[in-house]
Image (cartoon, rainbow, N blue to C red):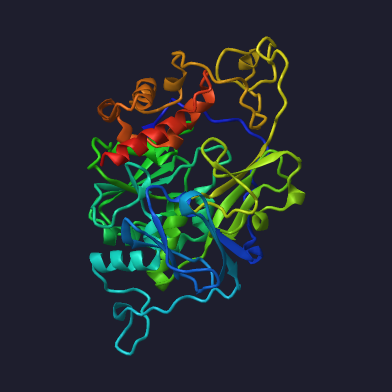
Amino acid sequence: MHLKLSKGHDFRLSNHPSQEVIDVSAEASQVILHPLDFPYIKPKLLLKDGSEVNVGTPVFIDKLNPNIKFVSPVSGNIEKIEYGERRSIQSITINNDSNYTAIQETSQEAKGEEGVEKNILPMDKNSWINSLTESGLWTLIRQRPFSKIADPDSAPKSIFISLYDTRPYGCNPELVISSNKEFFNNGIKLLGKIADCPIHITAGRDFDLDLINIGNQRSCNIHSIEGPHPAGNVGVQIHHIDPILSKENICWYLDVNSLIDLGYFFDHKGYNPYKIISVCGEDLSTPNFRKIVKNQSLDSILSSDEIQTKNYRVISGDMLSGSEKDLNCGISNYDDMLTILFKDEKREFLGWINPGFSKYSLSNTFLSKLLSNLVLKTNSRLNGEKRSIISFGRWEEVLPMDIMPEELVKSILIEDLESMENLGIYECAEEDFALCSYVCQSKTEVSQIIKRGLELSALDV
């Protein structure tokens, strides 16, 4: 199948990341786990301050599903555990001894007659699933609806892998795969062993398909896609290829780094502590790709010398849908980008009355609309105050889904669960509506409202 989407927008940006991978994993003296990065779980600690850990040691579990384990990506010891209100676990800091000592494999299924570990195991579906949950790798597999960790006891109707990244300064999937081609393809092979359903891989028309080797997996389908952001979002692709019609319709999805981790586990029966991310931003002197340790602290990934502005925000993820982080935090578990934004606190005098030749706008409000080569100067300014929702049709212009966003948002605000369900809340995720927030003339936080709607719907499940 070929998808050609027209709705959306690709930002014209400067200072794109260079196509090289810099290894900064040696700087990871600490990793910081943030249980709140995982939605819809209730974390329960298994260790305490000072506990020794190895790569793959379970640190906490989900009270709602104790089989889901969250593990340490390094060996060392737990330095501190920070709590928030009502004893909620905010962060777990682990000192890295840089030895990356792995926990011992004790399963007899993973060893030969003499106890020698095998590279490829003749395991059935349930054995693979149990092995992934025990190793902590099951957390890499997420499901729609709700964008949460997949339930290992529920079978999906399809699996989606997006190799088309349209986000601002998006991470280049082709570059990441080329560095780990064998692991990536073995990850696809492992998915075929744990799920009896079609696997949909979407890639741009210029993607090097020689990097993908699906072998004899008949259920694996490769689709081509083109169009502006958010065409690369997996939620948009699910909507057009295999829509979610009810909360019982479950689709799994993974990103490129997660597939590489599964392939590493398939080959080595171990936990891969590394991943590749994009570090980008207009005010960054050295934007590039970097090999890091999972959950590595941001101050060891970024150097203050390379940030060319004093007032800035560090965004874990892309500038439209990422979350702001302090440098003493760890990179979020599912994020493969760090974006630096200029923190502009100045208020423009009578900005609404200026002709706006230098203002980047998606509407006809300013004369800059006549300039097709204008580059966006990224900053965090809101450009106005919040107002009542005014129907101008701008949300629909940038949302390539057969969903009525304005009606959906209003049904969420009044907490009408039946209307939310009829309007397609189960197909939605907050990142798919990030452009709606950007173009909104009323400064409505559309993404956050969609997130709230999903939380309300999850309570009803």
User: Residue 243 at what x, y percent from top left?
Assistant: 28, 36
- 17 in relation to 214, above or below: above
- Judge left or right: residue 331 versus residue 411: right
Q: Quadrant of residue 32?
A: bottom right
**Could you tell me how many numbered marks the image carries?**
0
The furthest residue to the bottom: 114
- 84 in relation to 378, above or below: below
- 180 in relation to 396, above or below: below
- Where the N terminus falls, by quadrant? top left
User: Residue 244 at what x, y percent from top left?
Assistant: 27, 37
Residue 123 showing in the rendered view: yes
- Judge left or right: residue 374 versus residue 306: left
The furthest residue to the front: 86
User: Residue 166 at what x, y percent from top left?
Assistant: 50, 38
Residue in front for this viewpoint, 135 or 399? 135
- Judge left or right: residue 338 versus residue 147: right
Residue in front for this viewpoint, 72 or 144? 72
User: Residue 410 at what x, y percent from top left?
Assistant: 37, 22
Residue in front for this viewpoint, 22 or 332? 332
Residue at (37% x, 54% y) in the render? 141
- Where the C terminus falls, by quadrant? top left
Q: Quadrant of residue 404?
A: top left
Residue in front for this viewpoint, 122 or 252? 252
Residue at (31% x, 84% y) in the render? 112
Residue 293 showing in the rendered view: no
Residue at (63% x, 61% y) in the render? 23
The furthest residue to the top: 353
